[in-house]
Amino acid sequence: MNKKAFVYLRINTLRTSTPKVQKRLNKHQINTSLIPGFPDTLRLSQNIKLTNTEFYKNGWFEIQDINSQRVSIFTNPKPGMFVIDACAGSGGKALHLATLMQNKGCILAIEPSNEKRRQLEIRTKRNGISIINNDTSENKDIFKKNKESADIVLIDAPCSGLGVLKRNPSAKWHMDPKRINQIINLQQEIIQKYSILVSKGGILVYATCSIFPNENQNQIKHFLNSKNGKLFTLLDQKTFLTHQSNGDGFYMSKLMKTG
């Protein structure tokens, strides 16, 4: 846990290619390595700031943990789909989804924070992406307008963050049983609320950067036993631990709406 977390670059294939980025970075004495199984990812050999470089400003890459990238790959969106990112934050996964969709289709990124939505708009422009629209979760019309209409709903849920202790060691001091229970209740509320937006035959993906079963597998069990959850079938679930994957701790599950 005391080792520094690796820094990964997710290459924006709408703007460039992995070989081109690696070659250009190498010319500036910035060494990177390829990651087997991740053709659009580079790992920095040294943790250095790249957000002030021309490459970053031109939208050639985003800085994104390898296991965070796995979530969008696991979600597996296709060009032309309607995808809802229910807890979008500043848009790291929405940007990746849009890239995987080849900037074709529509992504609705939902985020209550005005500042995070502003950051998403800046990042979207830098990445050359046109299919992401954003809205606040305070807008109740979202749920009326988009009921049972999304091909995919991604819930990257608020969590304890205990999968990212290597990157954020102070997180463990902000958690206690009461706080974790509040988070667990919020997660279930979010799953229930956004699951109604999935179309029949559509996909619900639930992910956290936690490794606690009560935030992960047990949440999904609880949901599947609920009225809304009985309409869904669990297709797959995965857990990635830091010491095994060289990335942040993550959980992800995929459910299909079959009812």
Image: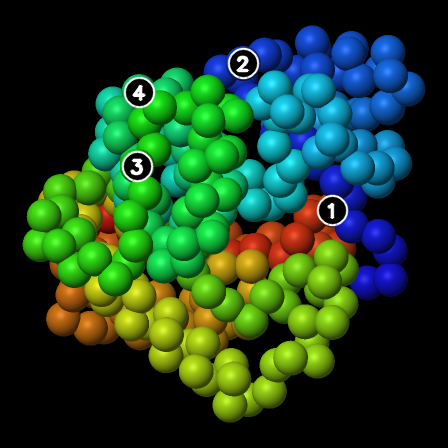
Q: Is residue 52 above or below residue 138?
A: above
- Sequence-earlier tag: 4 or 1: 4
Badge 4 marks a residue whose secondary structure is loop
Q: Nearer the viewer, mark 3 or mark 2?
A: 3
Quick one: label 1, few (<14), some, or many (20+) residues within 10 Å?
some
For the residue pair 79 and 236, the one nearer the viewer reads as 79
For the residue pair 232 and 124, the one nearer the viewer reads as 124
Quick one: label 4, few (<14), some, or many (20+) residues within 10 Å?
some
Q: Nearer the viewer, mark 3 or mark 4?
A: 3
Quick one: label 3, few (<14), some, or many (20+) residues within 10 Å?
some
Q: Is residue 67 above or below residue 252?
A: above
- Kindly identify which residue carries mark 2: 15
- Residue 118 has which mark? none
Badge 1 marks a residue whose secondary structure is loop
Q: Amino acid at mark 2?
A: Arg
- Kindly identify which residue carries mark 1: 246
Q: Amino acid at mark 1?
A: Asn
- The image's colour scheme reads rainbow
**Extreme residue toward the right, this view:** 29
Quick one: label 2, few (<14), some, or many (20+) residues within 10 Å?
some
Residue at point 63%, 68% (across, down):
162
- Kindly identify which residue carries mark 4: 104
- Kindly identify which residue carries mark 3: 133
Q: Is residue 205 above or below residue 230?
A: above
